[in-house]
Amino acid sequence: ISENLFRAIANSNLEASGDLVRSNITRPVTVGSSINAPGRWDLNSVSITMKVVLVLLVCAVAAFADVDVTPYNIPVFPEDAWIGERIVNGQPAATNQFPHQATVFSTNNNATGGFCGGSLISPIWVYSAAHCTRGFNWYHIGVGSINRLQQQQTQISNHVIEHPQYNPQNLNNDVCVIRLDNPLQINAAVQVIRQPTRSEQGQLWVGAHALVSGFGRTTNTGPISNQLMFTGIRIISNAECASVYGTSVIVASTICGRGWDFDSQSTCNGDSGGPLILRQAGGDVHIGVVSFVSGAGCDSGHPSGYARSTHFIDWVNANTGIPIVP
């Protein structure tokens, strides 16, 4: 499917079933491999699919009321893969196991919205994916609970900084930071996760055992989860990842992984923007922002893709004032 093919628009005639949208084709379509910008999901867990010659699984669209969401598609090489995300074949998180986990529900003045994850990187800053905030102007942030519907602390913000080189067509530089008006209260359930240090900036972490967490879908067709889930991820080389998605998608600022126990452990719809972390003796370190998975299915075994945190430490510092540790 060629890049920038369509807009997905909620079909009011099908609203009762809540699972179909129509797509307006704006450019010629060639059926083939593609990726699909992921991550947004309905607060009410309404499933939405699109038809573009064939039915495509959408990881990043949702309806809070009427929907007007624009996903982007680009060719990938060489396998059948569209981009999306959710935690599949994972396990429930324990209380306070991921105290840096945030929920991000983005809305417009007209009440459309989408659900994502995020990471608390200071008492007033949440790190997430740019595709989660693009096109929205209000961001409902929740922290402090493994139950999506019972967050300990909540705030609404209208201040987001997206990376100026964010490319919605190939998801390069898919990062943003959201500023809160008031500092969150730090406690056992609400903790800041540290960014990579300057000395870690050259780390690739290939072969490392990382963890990814989120409230996204736990199956390809299920709703987003009320329970925080997590799974182990084995970091792979960018060369291996590019053999699936191509070198326009997999760049120096991308980090990829496959399931630690088996390949079909992965992220899914609603996990976008959430944290990819390493557990270290000195504490957890944030190494990636959930960005995409294969549209062939969350359990397809294709790699999951993340924005590489080491690539953005200077950008985060410049925009948040959070100091870079040597």
Image (spheres, grey):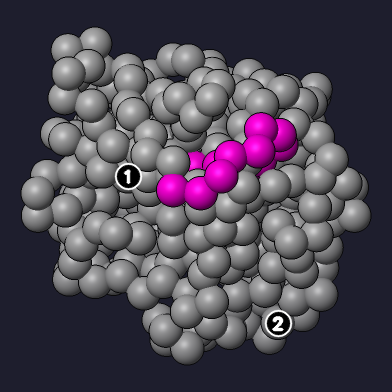
In magenta segment, residue 30: yes
Give the structural element (helix, strand or loop) at label 1. strand
Tell me the residue that label 2 is attached to.
198
- The residue segment tinted magenta is 26-40
Q: Amino acid at mark 1?
A: Val
The residue lying toward the viewer, choosing from 198 and 250, is 250
Q: In this rendering, would 290 be left or right of 143?
A: right
Do tag 2 and tag 1 residues touch (Cβ < 8 Å)?
A: no
The residue lying toward the viewer, choosing from 125 and 3, is 3
Q: Residue furthest left?
A: 110
Residue found at x 72% / y 23%: 300
| Mark 1 Cα-neighbour bin, 10 Å: few <14, some 14–19, many ≥20 | many
Q: In this rendering, would 249 be left or right of 322?
A: right
* Whole-percent x, y for residue 253 in the image: 70, 68
Tell me the residue that label 1 is attached to.
69
- Magenta stretch, main secondary structure, is loop
In magenta segment, residue 255: no
